[in-house]
Image: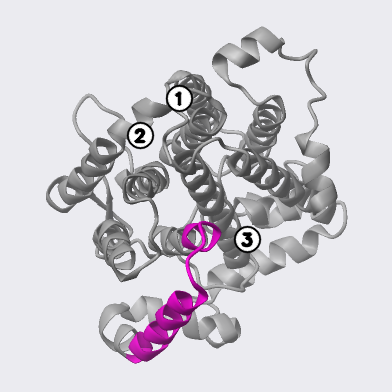
Amino acid sequence: MSEIVRWFGASRIHHIISGRTRQRLHFDGYLTILILILCTLGLTVLYSALDQDIRAFSTQLTRIIIGLALFVVAVCIRKDTYYWLAPVIYSGTIALLIAVWFYGDVSQGSKRWLDFPGLPRFQPSELLKISLPLIIGWYFAIRKFKNNLLDIFWIGILVGVPILLIFLQPDYGTAMILCAGTIGVLFVVGFKWWWFAVGGCSVLVATPFIWNFVLYPYHRRRILTLFNPESDPLDSGWNIIQSKTAIGSGGFSGKGLFNGTQSRLDFIPEGHTDFVLAVSGEELGFIFCTCLLLLYLLIFVRAMYISKNAESGFGFTVGSGICIIFICNVVVNVAMVLGLLPIIGLPLPLISYGGSSAITTMVAFGVLLSVCTRKENRELT
């Protein structure tokens, strides 16, 4: 891993983006190119998963272009602007999550979306992938990180309120990765290990309560069928069985793009969103999926390298938070598709169909580049 970090730390693509342009816009050539490659592969796979639907493909292509434009805008915004606006962005996200309760659209039993007249339909919980790292970084910057019970309390409030709102939608997938991302951030900024031990024990103690009073019956069925999908092959076990069948039938090199039988015959549920990796495995095989996961790993390693070298604690915390939430999203989706985790409805970043996830992910990386590479206001700690 250290060799990968050192290799990516070298500056080897000056000929692609001029030094003056990179200095002005604070682009990182490696990270930008890796994201572009991932978007290109994602559009290719998605075109097949959408059954070559030109209209739907054009919609997703437009979203990717908008995301890239906002990525550039996010990079150009000054670091101290993000610092001072962090509470505003966080509060705005909370307001949108509350608005979901009153104005949200119900889809597949969950109320997660806002669809105001004249505006595109979007999922406010995706914004937490940006606003949560920003508010945690802002808090530690003003508190100077004392690593005590008061820090735990306020971080618990700042993180717990939005996660509770998401949990009640219910959107357990997003809540899970945000919890994992927060734990990861607290770990990298230096929280004592016993806080994690206390938290883990608290979760174990609360497990019976969560199982009996928090989880819906269909969530409990999904967890139980995870261990034996064949016990309910036509209902809660269907997704796992069809996903594994598709990936297994693809073999080493796949059946060929547009030639997947599981996807073409609609056996794979949500093949263009949550289970797009299963479509990739069937049509393009183990080699492609391995390369795709390696690409995600390279993006994570490069982004963490950039965050590690940030000139302020604020930049390091925000960048690390964005990276960890991103990779948690990937890991949970892959585990879900492989039948290692219950089905919780989580897209694969920059691959799955959908605008909220794709645009938010690219804006998040733009924020990361801004707060981690700009040199002004070094006093932000």
| Left or right position of 82 against 14 | left
Residue designated by label 1: 74
Q: Are marks 2 and 3 in contact (CB under 8 Å)?
A: no
The mark lying in front, picked from 2 and 3, is 2
Q: Nearer the viewer, mark 2 or mark 1?
A: 2
- Magenta stretch, main secondary structure class: helix
Q: Which residues are magenta?
A: 185-208
Disc 2 to disc 1, C-alpha distance:
13 Å
Locate the N terminus and report the quarter of the image it occupies: bottom right
Secondary structure at badge 1 equals helix
- The residue drawn where x is 51% and y is 29% is 366
- Residue 34 point in image, percent of width and height: 70, 33
Labels 2 and 1 touching (C-beta < 8 A): no
Q: Are marks 3 and 1 in contact (CB under 8 Å)?
A: no
Residue 6 to residue 379: above or below: below
The numbered dot on residue 83 is: 2
Q: Nearer the viewer, residue 375 or 108?
A: 375
Specify the amino acid type for callout 1: Ala
Q: Position of residue 149 (x, y in %)?
A: 31, 71
Please say whether residue 368 is one of the residues in the magenta stretch: no
Residue 308 percent coordinates (x, y)? 62, 44
Magenta stretch holds residue 195: yes
Q: Going by the image, does 291 lie left or right of 43?
A: right
Quadrant, the C terminus: top left
Residue 203 image offset from top left, x and y in percent: 39, 82
Towards the viewer: 321 or 245: 321
Q: Is residue 345 visible?
A: yes
Please name the residue shown 73% across and 61% down the image.
247
Q: Nearer the observer, disc 3 or disc 1?
A: 1
